[in-house]
């Protein structure tokens, strides 16, 4: 049995370390050698953080499958860390200064996303002879300068997204083995040393998003015979580099004038990103990029479609959004046989005329929003049978949409917001269940909501607001398991919203029926079934998620939906999944406000104004403790304002005006901030803030 009182040095080489080992009760331990151990995921030494006095930790040649425990960061007295030969601390939160002495045998050090902070000293890199891979990226509290050390065998150095600053020293040229140097999004300044041209083994160089000044040294184009990927920003004008390049990212520079002819020799380019520059197009430019697959020209100064594109046959991604392209889409462009084109973004330009027939058989994403396109949508659009995203919003399209739109099997997102489409809705999901987002707000669609929507098992957002849709409430949509947003405001819907059938909508968070002709009572079961408004599920705790994100948090598509907040019509760029709202205003609902509303504990906005509701305001509403906006105005509500409402700590907007409420207005932290217009038009209401 180990004595917990006296032992200060322990070496346990290549033995089995159980998690709950009595080892971790040795509070006086200052040296621990766990070299050659094999920690599989269930056996990582989780209690290591208890060893508060530990000064030397030797994990030499230990093998970690899985992660080193976060607890390593509690070892505030640690002066030497001899990490294993293959040490990965990826994603471990070590909010502590850098361990000062790193083993001279270390070859691979991965400290990305570890919350490292403090100043990176040159000793960190000493002796550098063994270190082949150094990954320090994504530690924005890490400061310091690039070490002025000579001789290094490092092959890969990634210090991107850190606070490392100062000039890039001349000695960088001595890192002669370097293959990959990533300095993206640091704080480097000054000019780039000529010696960088000595990095003859370099294949990937990322100097973008820094404060470099001056030119890319001409030495680069002479000696970089292996370079395949170059990222650079802050570039004053021209770029000269060598023809080995396959990936060239020059976004956010000040490249101006016509498309850089100097790129003409880069015949191996497959990716060219020139976005956010002052580049204009020039009909005379005749470049042939025989392998170009991705061309990013968004946020430039293009006024026409670059004519050289007719020489490029291999395009897969073409982004010319946010330029100044005006006029019609030229025939040569729409007539290109780009069989591999998957992504075309022409949004935010001034395109006019009719949408031509494209011949891009593989197109998956077509974004034409914010242009001035007009006329009908031709049915040959449906011939692009791989289409997953079609965004034609904010244009002047007219007439009815082709019926075949309902039959595109792969369609995932359809956005036709703010056009002038008429006629009935196509039979969505006629052949598949792929649709996730259907947003048609602000057109002149009429007729009923198509029953085929019942096939859309993945539908999350349906917004048909601001149209002329006529019919009764589509309560049958309630069986759609994923439906989170249902917006039907400002149409010609009528009749009661509850039917004899059960009312579901298990995941609904936004429910907007405002400005229709709905009537009847608000039955208790309607609200009882909004399960998603009752409790936030685990996913939403902590970080706010937005709709349209995939599992990694990458934005696939920014769903935008309009929302009435405090009387203002706001178009939300991203829909936060925690923003739960119910808007039934400006209808003919009657009867009392159901008490079951109290269970919607994550409700953020409730608007029942401009109806014929009677009875008292249920005191149970006071339990809606996340509510920020409550509008019950323009009804026929009677009785007192319940004192319980003052418990709503987040309430920022309240309108109870134009009812028949009586006697004193209750006091409370939030209530004391509301003014006259929250209460006006209630003849028997008195007390502050009213003068009566
Ligand atoms: C780490 O432990 C191993 C095994 O005992 C030993 O060979 C090595 O020298 C130690 N490293 C340091 C830096 O103490
Ligand atoms: C990392 O740890 C620090 C200190 O314990 C804490 O403040 C911080 O929130 C943690 N960060 C993450 C992403 O867990
Ligand atoms: C780091 O190592 C050097 C050289 O081995 C030694 O002189 C110095 O004391 C060490 N620093 C710490 C904090 O252990
Ligand atoms: C490194 O680059 C500088 C400047 O381009 C040059 O003068 C020097 O000779 C180069 N050194 C080596 C070892 O190639
Ligand atoms: C282009 O790439 C091919 C294959 O990757 C290579 O063989 C060729 O040498 C490259 N051309 C240039 C000019 O670098
Ligand atoms: C780029 O264009 C913008 C807007 O036209 C202009 O303000 C800016 O001066 C231009 N920059 C350069 C480097 O030409
Ligand atoms: C392209 O290459 C040719 C021949 O290698 C050379 O003469 C010409 O100057 C190069 N053009 C540019 C813009 O670099
Ligand atoms: C553009 O270049 C291609 C390939 O080099 C050539 O075939 C074509 O004739 C050129 N066109 C013009 C208008 O110069
Ligand atoms: C098209 O470009 C715009 C502006 O650059 C961007 O906001 C939008 O997300 C892009 N569309 C797609 C589908 O990526
Ligand atoms: C679209 O496809 C249909 C059926 O496959 C075909 O008859 C029609 O000609 C195509 N239209 C265009 C414009 O390619
Ligand atoms: C839609 O059409 C109506 C009637 O033709 C017209 O008055 C209106 O300006 C059009 N709106 C748009 C955005 O095109
Ligand atoms: C709705 O459609 C029905 C049948 O087409 C029609 O009788 C009725 O007048 C329409 N209602 C409104 C408000 O347009």
Image: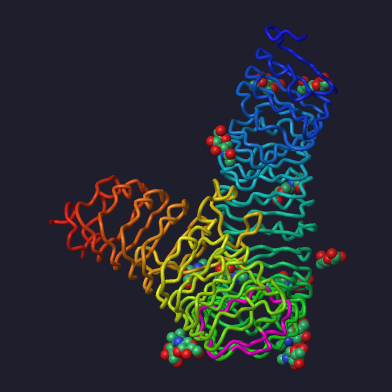
Q: In the image, residue 296 lies at what x, y percent?
A: 64, 70
Quadrant hosting residue 29: top right
- Furthest-front residue in this view: 500
Q: Nearer the viewer, residue 417 or 374?
A: 417
Q: In the image, residue 5 lies at what x, y percent?
A: 67, 7
Write the residue at 38% across / 53% down.
621
Is residue 123 within the magenta segment? no
Q: In the image, residue 210 lies at what x, y percent?
A: 57, 52
Left or right of residue 630: residue 368: right
Is residue 403 within the magenta segment? yes
Is 555 located above or below residue 65 in the figure?
below
Q: Nearer the viewer, residue 629 or 576?
A: 629
Is 327 located above or below residue 138 in the figure?
below
Left or right of residue 641: residue 300: right
Write the residue at 33% across / 50% down.
645
Write the residue at 67% across / 54% down.
206
Is 596 located above or below residue 427 in the figure?
above
Q: In the image, residue 526 lies at what x, y percent?
A: 49, 63
Q: Nearer the viewer, residue 187 or 284?
A: 187
Left or right of residue 152: residue 73: left
Which quadrant of the figure contains the C terminus?
bottom left
């Amino acid at each position: 049995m180990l004595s917990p009182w006296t032992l200060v040095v322990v070496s346990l080489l290549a033995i089995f370390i159980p998690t709950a080992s009595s080892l971790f009760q040795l509070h006086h331990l200052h040296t621990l050698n766990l070299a050659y151990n094999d920690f599989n995921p269930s056996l990582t030494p989780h209690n290591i953080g208890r060893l508060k006095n530990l000064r030397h930790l030797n994990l030499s040649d230990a093998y970690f499958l899985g992660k080193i425990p976060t607890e390593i960061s509690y070892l505030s007295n640690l002066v030497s860390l001899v990490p294993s030969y293959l040490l990965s601390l990826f994603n471990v939160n070590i909010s502590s200064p850098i361990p000062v002495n790193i083993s001279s045998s270390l070859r691979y050090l991965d400290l990305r996303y570890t919350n490292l902070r403090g100043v990176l000293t040159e000793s960190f890199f000493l002796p550098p002879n063994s270190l082949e891979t150094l990954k320090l990226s994504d530690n924005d509290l890490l400061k310091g300068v690039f070490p002025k050390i000579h001789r290094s065998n490092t092959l890969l150095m990634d210090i991107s997204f850190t606070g490392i600053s100062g000039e890039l020293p001349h000695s960088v040229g001595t890192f002669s083995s370097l293959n990959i140097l990533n300095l993206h999004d640091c704080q480097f300044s000054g000019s780039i040393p000529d010696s960088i041209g000595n990095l003859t083994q370099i294949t990937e160089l990322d100097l973008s998003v820094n404060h470099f000044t001056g030119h890319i040294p001409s030495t680069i184009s002479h000696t970089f015979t292996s370079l395949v990927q170059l990222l650079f920003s802050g570039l004053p004008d021209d770029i000269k580099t060598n023809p080995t390049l396959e990936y060239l990212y020059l976004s956010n520079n000040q490249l101006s004038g016509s498309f850089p002819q100097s790129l003409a020799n880069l015949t191996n380019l497959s990716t060219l990103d020139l976005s956010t520059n002052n580049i204009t197009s020039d009909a005379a430019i005749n470049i042939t990029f025989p392998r170009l697959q991705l061309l990013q020209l968004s946020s430039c100064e293009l006024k026409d479609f670059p004519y050289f594109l007719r020489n490029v046959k291999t395009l897969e991604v073409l982004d010319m959004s946010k330029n100044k392209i005006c006029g019609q889409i030229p025939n040569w462009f729409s007539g290109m046989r780009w069989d591999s084109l998957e992504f075309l973004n022409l949004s935010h330009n001034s395109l006019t005329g009719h949408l031509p027939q494209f011949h891009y058989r593989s197109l998956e994403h077509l974004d034409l929003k914010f242009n001035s396109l007009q006329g009908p949508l031709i049915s040959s659009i449906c011939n692009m049978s791989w289409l997953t995203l079609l965004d034609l919003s904010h244009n002047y399209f007219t007439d009815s949409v082709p019926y075949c739109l309902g039959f595109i099997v792969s369609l995932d997102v359809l956005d036709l917001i703010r056009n002038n489409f008429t006629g009935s809705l196509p039979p969505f999901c006629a052949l598949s269940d792929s649709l996730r987002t259907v947003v048609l707000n602000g057109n002149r669609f009429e007729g009923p909501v198509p029953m085929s929507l019942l096939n859309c098992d993945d539908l999350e957002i349906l917004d048909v607001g601001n149209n002329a849709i006529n019919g009764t409430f589509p309560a049958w949509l309630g069986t759609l398991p994923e439906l989170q947003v249902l917006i039907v405001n400002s149409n010609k819907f009528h009749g009661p919203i509850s039917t004899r059938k059960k009312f579901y909508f298990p995941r609904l968070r936004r429910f907007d029926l405002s400005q229709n002709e709905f009537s009847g009572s608000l039955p208790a079961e309607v609200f009882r079934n909004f399960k998603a408004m009752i409790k936030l599920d685990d996913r939403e705790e902590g970080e706010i998620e937005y709709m349209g994100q995939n599992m990694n948090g990458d934005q696939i598509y920014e769903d935008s939906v309009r929302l009435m907040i405090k009387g203002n019509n706001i178009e939300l760029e991203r829909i936060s999944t925690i923003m739960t709202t119910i808007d039934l205003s400006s209808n003919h609902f009657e009867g009392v406000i159901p008490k079951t509303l109290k269970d919607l504990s994550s409700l953020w906005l409730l608007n029942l104004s401009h109806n014929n509701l009677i009875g008292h305001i249920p005191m149970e509403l006071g339990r809606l403790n996340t509510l920020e906006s409550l509008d019950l105005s323009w009804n026929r509500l009677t009785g007192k304002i319940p004192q319980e409402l003052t418990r709503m700590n987040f309430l920022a907007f309240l309108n109870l005006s134009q009812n028949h409420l009586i006697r004193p207005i209750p006091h409370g932290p939030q209530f004391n901030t509301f003014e006259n217009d929250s209460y006006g038009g209630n003849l028997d209401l008195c007390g502050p803030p009213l003068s009566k």
